[in-house]
Every structure is written in C-alpha cells, then in structure tokens.
Amino acid sequence: MVPENDELNSRRQAREQERNFMAFQRKLLKIGLIITAATMILCIAAILITYGFLRPVPLDPSMSVTVPSSTAPTIQTEPVPTQPDTVIHFVAGGDLNVTDKTVASGTTVSGYDYTDVFMDVLPVLAGADLTAVNFEGSLSGTPYGTDRRSAPQQMMLALRNAGVDLVQAANSHSILHGLLGLRSTLDGIREAGMEPVGAFSDKAEFQKSGGFVLREVQGVRIAIVAFTKGMDGMGLPANGENCVNLLYKDYNSTYQKVDTEGITAVLRAAESAQPDVTIALLHWGSEFNSQISATQEKISELMLKEGVDAIIGTHSHYVQNAVFDPANGTLVAYSLGDLLGDADKAGTDYSVLLDLTITKDGATGKTSITGFDYTPIYIVDETATGGGMRVLRIREAMDAYENNCLGKVSDEVYAAMKSALEKIDSRMQTKK
C-alpha cells in the first residue's frame, strides 16, 4: 500500500470541516426564515381581527361537532395486585399432669411409650402451624409418678411426635427439684425437639431470651410468653432469680400482689422484637375452682393493655369461659382443663384443644386474631381393666358410638362425653 501524503490529508480534513460548518449555517438560516414568516403571519392576522376585517363564522348547529373534554388519550390501568391473606393456626392444650396413673399409661414390656395415649388427638395437634401444651411435672429421673411429679423422657417424645412445638414450663412444679431439676426438665424438652416457655436455666438465659419465645410462621411473627401464679408454695432457690416468670410478688403465699413491673418488663421485651401477635400462656386461678378471681381480671386487663392478643390459661383443671372480642381481635380463655390427668374428680375428665385463627391481611399487612375454634376432648381411663389412659376427641368418639363402629366407647363413657360436650359448648362460645 502506498502511504498517503500527510499535507494532502490535512487539507482534505480542513475542507471537510469547512463544508460541514457551511451546511450547518444554511440550516440555521432556513429555520430563522421560517420563524420570521410565521411571526409576520400571526401579526397580520391579529391586526385584521382587531380592525374587523376578519370575523369568526358561526357554525351551523346541525353541523356541530362534539369535542371530548380532554384530548388526552384514556389509559387503561390494571389494578395493583395485592398479596393474599396469610392464615395460620395456633393450637393450645391444657395441663399434662404427671401422676402414677398417667406415667403407667405408657408402660410397655421394654419401657415406656405414650404414642397411643395421644394418637387420637394427633390430627389436631400436628395439623396446626404451632402447638403448645402445659407440662405440669418434671424430667428429674426415677422414681416416676405422683410423689416426685417426674416423668420419663418418652412422654416428651410422644408429645413431639403428636405435633407439639412449645411446652409451658412455668407452673406449679417448675422448681420442685431445685435448679438442677428445672434444668434437667428444660434439657429434656429441648432434646425431644420442643422449646420450653416461661422458665430458664439461669438469669443469663432469661436475659438473653428477654423472657419470651419468638416464632415466625409463613412470615407471621408470634411472641409467646408464659407465667405461673406460683410454684406450689415454694420460693425461688438461691441463684434462681428470673428462672421462672411469675405473676405475683407474693407468689409463695397469698397471690394478692400482682407483679406489674415484672410482667410489664417481659411483655415490653417481647414487643421490642416487633411481633405481629403476642400470646400469653398463664398458669393461674385456683385448682378445682371455676371462679375467676379479681387478680386474674387485673392481670388480664394489664396484659391486653400491654399488647397481648390472646391469654390462654391452665391450672384450675376445669374448662372455664373463653371470651372473644372480635372488634379488638383479642381472646381470654381462662382455663382449658386437663389434657391428661387422673380424671378422678368431676369436671376434670374433659378439656379442649383451643385453635386460634391468626390472619395477616394481604392488603394492609395488619395481623390479628380473627376467630377461634375448639376440639372437645375426653380422658378415657381404662386402667381398671388392664389398659391405660387415652385422650379422645369427643365428637368423633360419639359419632363412632352412634354408628356402632368397631372399638367404640362404652355406654357409660358415651353418656359422660355427651354431658361434657354440653358443658364445654356453653363455656367456649362467649363473646364480649
């Protein structure tokens, strides 16, 4: 290839730049002339109209044209899609009492197995998004039974296999065997795959947790707190400060001085975690007494004021009223009765599994308790005939009896179930 002359190439570039500049000037001139002409036409028209040489011609009404009020095109907008509501279910059971009879119900040739005890209620417990029960006993080794309120670890495994997630550990027997007994109980609950609520190994664990448990289910944050009125007359042992959440300052005597500061501190710690819903599990009231005390009412008012959405009670061993306030989305169920116990006193052989409906509105993001349901259950005691104890759903067992199904309950149990169902329904359908 022959190299180009540098001087010639420079002149070519200069000419090209000059041509481009002249073309640009011509374009500017044309634009200026057009603008000048348009301005002159507008000025002449204005003068002619001013002096009457041009008048607007009226339109023939028959030839009128309707002009849209707006010439802007109509844009069809799609509605902004909202998220669907999120609905979850929190199920709670009553007291699981550790006694000679309840322990013996799981006795096998090789040890203990409580699977059959809870088999019939498994669909309810396992079908919920989150499930809690109150374990009124300890896991403190042998001997098992009433005297020491100690149960074998297999009882915890059966609860977990039945679908239980949370175990209330704040109750009458929390410190029956001191701090070592409390810690072994908490360890056993965790080893079974569940989480204890309301009791702590030491002050450090309490402070780390804030005194509450936080669970998230399908994007809904649920804070769970648990308290007990007392511990069977016992005081906290040395170095046991904050190991159990307590409702009263005089927790080992008269239960008259509500521990407002202690309760509020735990509830506000829970609130700082920004839960959508807060549920309180309370071991309160009086055993074998269906009356609601003045201090229970005071505690309820305090907790609802501090943002608790549902209060679920145990300890009386009876089913007591459940009061639902749909306007505020709150529920107070004073006592669920015994999930499992000796059932040797009138009214202690039946209870309920409470089912809270928690709804998160997809449009607003607001979460509240929108309703509740319950499953009536009955403790069938077959120990006199060589069997154990079983927890049965009342309605299903009655249906099986009425349809003469195999394995139906006895005439006596059917009659007791029918009577229990009437009492349960009357107490669980109270609205504020």
Image (cartoon, rainbow, N blue to C red):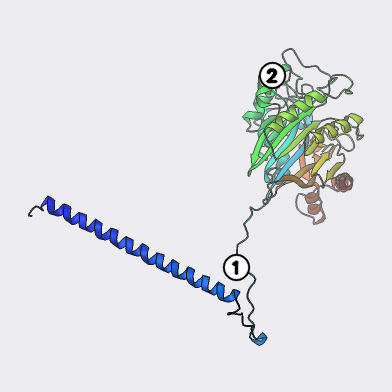
Res. 219 image quadrant: top right
User: What percent of the width, then of the height, locates residue 53?
Assistant: 58, 80
The N terminus - image quarter: bottom left
Residue depicted at x 85% and y 42%: 322
Q: Residue furthest left?
A: 2
Give percent across and percent down for residue 375.
78, 46
Image-quadrant location for residue 306: top right
Q: Nearer the viewer, residue 156 or 301?
A: 301
Mark 2: few, some, or many residues within 10 Å (few <14, many ≥20)?
A: some
Which residue is tagged 2?
A: 203
What kind of element bears circle 1? Answer: loop
Q: Residue at x 78, y 39 (%)?
A: 310
| Viewer-proximal residue among 130 and 420 | 130
Looking at the picture, how far across and down is residue 49, in whole percent? 59, 75
Q: Which mark is residue 74?
A: 1
Residue at position x 67%, y 29% from top? 189
Quadrant of the rendering where the C terminus is positioned: top right
**Residue 152 in view of the camera:** yes
Circle 1 crowding by C-alpha within 10 Å: few under 14, some 14–19, many from 20: few
Residue 106 visible within the image: no
Query: Tag 2: residue type?
Result: Lys
Which of 294 and 175 lies nearest the eye of the viewer?
Answer: 294
Say whether residue 24 is left or right of residue 81: left
Q: Is 408 rendered above or below residue 173?
A: below
Q: Check disc 1 and give the amino acid type.
A: Thr
Against 186, residue 393 (above or below) is below
Is 371 left or right of 163, judged from the image as shown?
right
Q: Disc 1 or 2, which lies upstream in sequence?
A: 1
Of the pair 366 and 316, the residue shown nearer to us: 366
Instruction: Name the element at disc 2.
Output: helix
Q: On screen, 326 above or below 281?
A: below
Q: Nearer the viewer, mark 1 or mark 2?
A: 1
